[in-house]
Amino acid sequence: MRTQVIVLNGGSSSGKTSLARGLQDLLPDPWLAFSVDTLVDALPARLREGGEGIAADTDTVAVGDTFRRLDTAWAHGIAAMARAGAHVLVDDVFLGGPASQARWREALAGLGVLWVGVHCAPAVAAAREAARGDRATGMAAAQATAVHRGVHYDVEVDTGTDPLDRCAARVAARLV
């Protein structure tokens, strides 16, 4: 089955968004890129402050039931675009590890999916986080390994040890 969706999973500041942009430049067909950050930015302000929504602290992210429901709807919307013929790159953070992957597997059932683990050492993620200045301090290091526990991939890359163009080429080589 031809690959219609590439799911990039990695912690905050792991290089997922940069890798998605690199893949868009490298791949011959147009690929639409969607980040969980886009979903969070689309939420009403009251849902970005915790409770039933989502809230980031120094080393944790808390999600409520309303966010979970909207996140599931978002995943099914992404899948609908792929079913309608679009190639889609998903940039996500599997806070729930295998449960997060299972939610995506359900939404993407019947589609050709390439699962990509985007790694970098916690110290590298923390340095990137500090340079960005738009994330809760400590989140990147805490997520660097946690989001990968129990998750299965078709290919894994390390943006801390390999240049992004090499990571993108490695992912592209796995497309069917």
Image (spheres, grey):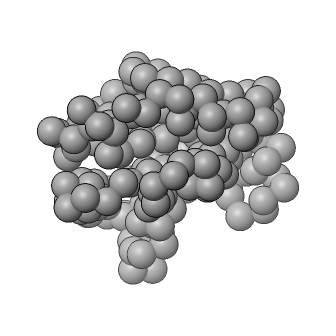
15 left or right of 111 in image: right
**Vertical order, 88 against 155 (above or below):** below
* Residue sitting at x 16%, y 39%: 109
From the viewer's side, name the closer residue of 77 and 37.
77
x, y percent for residue 104: 28, 42
Asked whether residue 72 is in view, the answer is no
> Which image quadrant is residue 118 in?
top right
Asked whether residue 25 is in view, the answer is yes
From the viewer's side, name the closer residue of 140 and 107.
107
x, y percent for residue 107: 20, 46
* Residue sitting at x 43%, y 33%: 175
**Vertical order, 96 against 70 (above or below):** above
* Residue sitting at x 58%, y 40%: 11
125 left or right of 176 in image: right
**Vertical order, 17 against 158 (above or below):** below
Quarter of the picture holding the N terminus: top left
* Residue sitting at x 49%, y 41%: 8
x, y percent for residue 151: 40, 24
The total of numbered circles placed on residues is 0
